[in-house]
Image: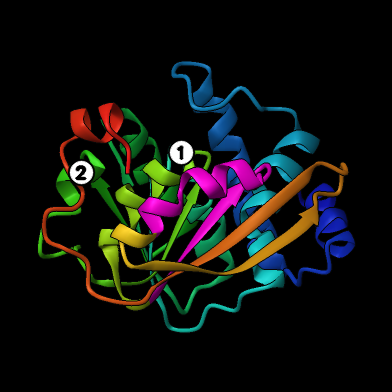
Amino acid sequence: MKEVLKKYCNQSKIDINDIQLNQFSDYYELLVEWNKVMNLTGITEIDDVAIKHYIDSIACLKFYQFSNSRIADVGTGAGFPGIPLAIMCPDCSFTLIDSLNKRITFLEEVCKSLNLSNVSLIHGRVEDVAHDSKYREQFDIVVSRAVAPLNILLEYTIPFLKVNGKLLSYKAKASEEELSISENAFKVLNVSLINKHDYKLPNDDDRVLMEIELVDKLEDKYPRNPGKIKKKPL
């Protein structure tokens, strides 16, 4: 994994050191081992993990530099993009949130094995955690990858941000239709799309990183309960 990932980081113009390469390699070994007994990912081949999980998670560093930031990963799953970003940004603190306890148990082992002291793990539904004063409006940045359509994702993620904080939404593509459908959510949640970065992974897959800013305080009622969010999206 180390040589493969180093090659793809060089191709992607992302700086990575030997300590970080070792951590990514250990993460891969744990991912493959635990995946034998629980469904963490359908992607397990070295090249695929290096590109589709690791590079995809850290490609945002080409456009957006984190420094001493408090970052939440909403719907982290097997730890993407939160764990790769925590490896690459040791001066930042990360809070990874997921609704499945077995994933949190896996991530506890990852953090222990990789000596990641800058990661906290939260087991809970995003809709509930977002109303907890310990986490609501506490983060400079929220990252989220392959969680929900944009209009629904905004309601899940924006409550975690401080005013002027940023959501970095990882998308395979950002169609004009999806943005159009999300216009009301942008208005209701007081957010603005301030940048949209189009790029390719080393295998030529298209990706988009949307940078969305909270420009004014959010109403306390958001996020609504999951039934309302799904039945009547903003």
Task: Please give the name of the residue rendered at 68% of the width and 53% of the height, measured from the top-left corner.
Answer: 208
Q: In this image, 63 relative to 71: left or right? A: right
Rendering coords of residue 57 (x, y %): 61, 53
* Residue 34 in view (yes/no): yes
First reached walking from the N terminus: tag 2 or tag 1: 2
Task: Report the amino acid beneath label 1.
Answer: Val
| Cα–Cα gap, marks 2 and 1 | 13 Å
Image height of 110 relative to 164, above or below: above
Q: Amino acid at mark 2?
A: Glu
Residue 165 is situated, as x and y percent measured from the top left of the image, at 38, 75
> Toward the viewer: 62 or 184?
184
Give 4 or 162, whichever is nearer the viewer.
Answer: 162
The secondary element bearing badge 1 is classed as loop
Taking the image as shown, residue 229 lies to the left or right of residue 215, namely left
Up-down: is 69 above or below 30?
Answer: below
Residue 18: percent from left, percent from top: 72, 66
What x and y, as percent, mark residue 107?
Answer: 39, 43
Whether residue 100 can be seen here: no
Residue at image coords 44%, 19%: 38
17 versus 188 height, above or below: below
Give the quarter of the figure containing the N terminus. Answer: top right
Indicate yes or no whether the magenta region holds residue 185: yes
At label 2, counting other C-alpha atoms closer than 10 Å, the crowd grade (few under 14, some 14-19, many 20 or more) is: some
Residue 190 is inside the magenta segment? no
Label 2 secondary element: helix
Quadrant where the C terminus lies?
Answer: top left
- The image shows residue 37, relative to residue 205, as above or below, that is above
Q: Which residue is mark 2?
A: 127
Question: Which residues, given as a range, are shown in magenta?
Answer: 165-186
- In the picture of the structure, the residue carrying the numbered disc 1 is 147
Residue 22 image-quadrant placement: bottom right
